[in-house]
Amino acid sequence: MSAGARLRRRLALIAAAALLLPMLLAPATPAASSDATLPDIEDEVMCPICGTQLGIAESPQAERERDFIRDRIDEGLDKEQIKDALVAEYGSEVLATPDTSGFDLAAWVVPGLIVIVAGAALVVSLRRWRNRGESGPDGDGKTPPAAGNDPGDEERLTADLGRYEL
């Protein structure tokens, strides 16, 4: 067998292993189980009476809503179906996430814009700070000459040091 044929055979084996490996390593998932859990849904819905997240609400209505969710989980509904049933039962105010249209769109857009503007301000500030350091203290691109010693100062210093020598 030639070297080229061996290389092609090895590449074919590697490709086959790469395709089969994810299937072998994938965890087994039960087919009939619902992916919905009460804590997972509680994080995404509100108590319609007190207006707080269901996970921290302590009103009797919140407990009735939790029972409603538990019943739907026992029926085998998935998370989206349960949230749809909650909206049908309590209204759209029960969802903790805002709509993606109208005024509620601002709840999604404004935080993103704030992050973008803050990032841009940081980049501009860092560039100015870096350029100011390169241009010198006067801002004219030139650094001032180093301060030289005055000949009179050197004579006084030598005289002062001479007095203290032993």
Image: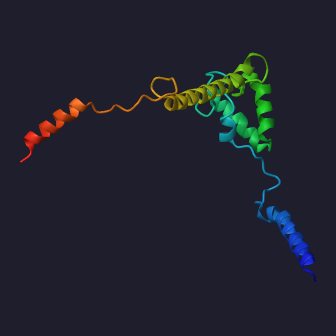
Residue pictured at 74% horizontal, 39% vertical: 71
Q: Find residue 23 and report its image quarter.
A: bottom right
**Where does the N terminus fall, quadrant-wise?**
bottom right
Q: Nearer the viewer, residue 141 or 1?
A: 141
How many numbered circles are shown? 0
Direction bottom: furthest residue: 1
Residue 28 located left or right of residue 141 = right
Whether residue 150 is visible here, answered yes or no, is yes
Residue 2 located left or right of residue 132 = right
Direction left: furthest residue: 166
Q: Find residue 73 and report its image quarter.
A: top right
Residue 94 located left or right of residue 132 = right
x, y percent for residue 118: 61, 26
Residue 68 located left or right of residue 132 = right
Q: Nearer the viewer, residue 113 or 20?
A: 113
Residue pictured at 21% horizontal, 30% vertical: 152
x, y percent for residue 154: 22, 35
x, y percent for residue 138: 46, 23
In this picture the colour scheme is: rainbow
Q: Nearer the viewer, residue 14 or 27?
A: 14
